Amino acid sequence: MHTMSAHAPLFNMDRYRQHLRRARRTYGQAETFKQLVADDFAERIALINRPFDLALDLGCRTGAMARALEACPDAQAKIKTLIQADWVADFTPDQDLVLDPDHFALKDEQFHLILAGLSLHVINDLPGALIQIRRALRPDGLFLGAVYGPNTLQEWRDSLMTAELELTGGAAQRFAPLIDVRDLGSLLQRAGLALPVTDIDTHVVRYDHPLAVLQDLRHLGETLMLSTSPAPLKKAVLVRAVEIYQDRYTDSDGRVRATLEIVTASGWAPHDSQQKPLRPGEADISLAEALRTQN
């Protein structure tokens, strides 16, 4: 779990935004992950039996969420207006807002639905961001978010660490820490979101070469975002890491595997109409009685 430190923030947001600006030209070449999550969000929205007049796409990038809604009429019909926002400008001609990732500056109780698909994993103060999201939701408004889980790119993490240990005797932190499903559920509760639900999906993406995985990360602007940068990776270590990757994670057809783990979470801004847990003593029968009825 990562939280903001006034002295040593985990992520260098200026550097990250610089990488995102460069990635505007290449993002669409590697947007498979983003579109995968957006399509999943659209399917979930289609199953909810209520409208969302004003929705915010927090981290719109090149418009994957808008495209997913267009492809899913049952979901599109639920949303009257979709506001598209990101940390930098001009990802898509339809982008409406540029937000500061440290302080969104959204009006209280403004949105009926806030969507954040793979856009919160580099926020320094994730608990604070979720509180801002909860405040920006109208009562009984829905937050639906997805982040990369800790097993994402486990193949590259393993290969690089093994290669560095083998050739240098130590291993630097070269990948950002990622939040797991239990921690994300706890953060939703801490932010004051009601009825939190979390789930996790694992996808395996296949590439022609391990370096193609890193190329996709560069196309997405998802490289070198940590505040404390490790020493440059030596060529010999990279070459050895590729060898290890190919040895351990190559399929019979010669292609290599890359794991994508997605943690999805939802929570509602509190409202009197929502179901609430019974207080002690309010149940019709005791747990002991319920258990006896099963015997």
Image (tube, grey):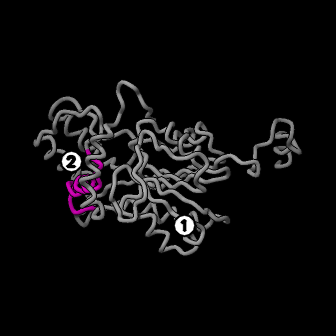
Q: Is residue 179 visible?
A: yes
Q: Nearer the viewer, residue 207 or 191?
A: 191
* Label 1 close to label 2 by CB (< 8 Å): no
Tell me, yes or no, if residue 289 can be seen here.
no
Is the magenta region chiefly helix, strand or loop? Answer: helix
Q: Position of residue 59 (x, y in %)?
A: 42, 54
Estimate the x, y position of residue 145 in percent, counting from the top left.
50, 52
Label 1: few (<14), some (14–19) or many (≥20) C-alpha neighbours in 10 Å: some
Question: Is residue 242 found left or right of 60 in the rendered image?
Answer: left
Identified by mark 1, the residue type is: Glu
Residue 23 is tagged as none
**Residue under the point 17% across and 49% down:** 243
Q: Nearer the viewer, residue 207 or 120?
A: 120
Residue flagged by tag 2: what amino acid is it?
Ile
Question: Residue 2 occupies which quadrant of the picture?
Answer: top left
Task: Name the element at disc 1.
Answer: helix
Identify the residue under disc 1.
Answer: 43
Horizontal side of 294 relative to 97 (left or right) equals right
Q: Nearer the viewer, residue 187 or 268?
A: 268
Q: Is residue 196 above or below residue 30?
A: above
Q: Circle 2 — which element?
A: helix
Extent of the magenta region = 207-223
In the rendered image, the residue lying farthest to the top is: 7
Question: Quick check: is 43 in the magenta stretch?
Answer: no
Q: Using residue 155 as the reference point, say whether residue 287 is left or right of it.
A: right
Quarter location, residue 240:
top left
The image quadrant of residue 75 is bottom right
Identify residue for label 2.
Answer: 244
Of 217 and 244, which appears nearest the observer? 217
**Residue at the image position 36 percent from the left and 54 percent from the top:** 259
The reply to whether the magenta stretch includes residue 208 is yes
- Classify 10 Å Cα crowding around label 2: few (below 14), some (14-19), many (20 and above): many
